Image: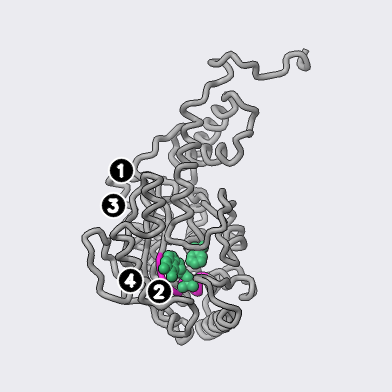
Amino acid sequence: MPTSLETMISAIQPINLDAVQAASDHLDQLTKPPGSLGKLEEIAKQLAGITGITVPKIGKKAVIVMAADHGVCEEGISAFPSEVTQQMVLNFCSGGAAVNVLARHANADVVCVDIGVNAPLEHPLLYSRKVRFGTANMAKGPAMTEQEAHQAIQVGIQLVEELAAQGYTLFATGEMGIGNTTASSAILAVLTEEEIKHTVGRGTGIDDERLQHKQAVIARAIELNQPDKDNALDVLAKLGGLEIAGLTGVILGAALHRCPIVIDGFISSAAALVASRIAPLSVSYMIASHQSQEKGHERLLKAIGLSPMLHMDMRLGEGTGAVLAFPIIEAALKIMMEMATFASAGVSQTDNQTDS
Ligand SMILES: Cc1cc2ncn([C@H]3O[C@H](COP(=O)(O)O)[C@@H](O)[C@H]3O)c2cc1C
Ligand SMILES: O=C(O)c1cccnc1
């Protein structure tokens, strides 16, 4: 691992357990049976631990949508052509994609990043951080060099640093890249030593025949590249995508800046799995938003140690599930701020008759 990345990773701190305890004590004073708000309480405690503040305030919110192309598309593994990636980037920039709508609903900003789209793209709202014009075809050789994977991770880390300086405190992962469920499935298979048939799904909606072909392409890519399962950076470089590497950086950057990072669907979770292997402490900064319908996502979340809060039968990516979770996260903080305590409301906290 490059020393700059090692230094950064060693700067990630564990979450503050005193703040978690203080939040837990406060929750138990509120007018409800202990633990009865379930995951809302877990989120409130996690936010306290992440920020080190019992009842933190949320500043600006952003979903970072990393976009890149995949050389493996020439194998015919998606239901859509690669050109859709660049077309969707312009759609994100003009505010018309699903994630734009849901981000507006959650009062969050969409930060769209060209980290490796296979076309020269320009738009006043686009963050141009291209590492290269798409990956190489992983079925014929490594998708990218380790140096490029590292560069893409740094793009993500630096972007979070920039946004944190502008007052953003809550982040979500999003992505766009035709072919990226292939890359994500391959990463999942290698890092968890899982059989390919359990890690590969239909992505944009391929039929049975194409699904079998997709599995065969992934098997070939793994056989050819021989990624080292104990070296997540090697796996990321050989099988990954530039947007997946960029999101790994976003997750590490959020952990470094003590900000919660909401993880979207299958592809975002592949980036989270890589982050968890490179920097295990980063997991406590992650909040899993939803369970995607993509096959393998449940396994992927389990491998990281995350439990999703929403089951919406969604399978889009872009950060759609993650921004949908923003209002729930804010609701958890409102509970901490606005609920009356047993003492202030004059509500009995114990059954005195049983006690006596
Ligand atoms: C119009 C359109 C919008 C999307 N937004 C996200 N994805 C999602 O689908 C792609 C992954 O599926 P596969 O691996 O099968 O290509 C990614 O771009 C992902 O973000 C989209 C796909 C399409 C077609
Ligand atoms: O869960 C996802 O992120 C997903 C699933 C299918 C296609 N694109 C994205």
- The mark nearer the N terminus, 2 or 4, is 4
- Identify residue for label 2: 146
Q: Tag 2: Cα neighbours inside 10 Å, few (<14), some, or many (≥20)?
A: some
Residue 270 appears anywhere in the view: no
Task: List x then y, in percent, for residue 305.
Answer: 59, 55
Q: Position of residue 130 (x, y in %)?
A: 29, 69
Residue type pointed to by label 3: Glu
Q: Which quadrant holds residue 300?
A: bottom right
Q: Secondary structure at mark 1?
A: loop
Name the residue rendered at 51%, 53% in the picture: 283
- The residue depicted at 23 percent of the width and 67 percent of the height is 122
**Front tag of 4 and 1:** 4
3D distance between C-alphas at marks 2 and 4? 25 Å
- Give the residue type at disc 2: Glu
> Can you tell which mark lies on residue 167?
1
Q: Amino acid at mark 4?
A: Gln
Element type at mark 4:
helix
Residue 313 located left or right of residue 279: right
Residue at the spot of label 3: 162
- Looking at the rendered structure, the secondary structure element under dot 3 is helix
Q: Quadrant of the C terminus?
A: top right
Residue 180 counted in the magenta span: yes
Q: CA distance from mark 3 to mark 1?
A: 9 Å
Give 188 or 253, whichever is nearer the viewer: 188
Q: Position of residue 169 (x, y in %)?
A: 37, 44
In the image, is residue 129 above or below residue 172? below
Over which residues does the magenta segment extend? Answer: 176-184
Question: Observer-nearest residue: 52 or 102?
Answer: 102
Q: Is residue 265 magenta?
A: no
Residue lying at 45% horizontally and 42% vertically, measured from the top left: 327
Residue under label 4, please give it. Answer: 86
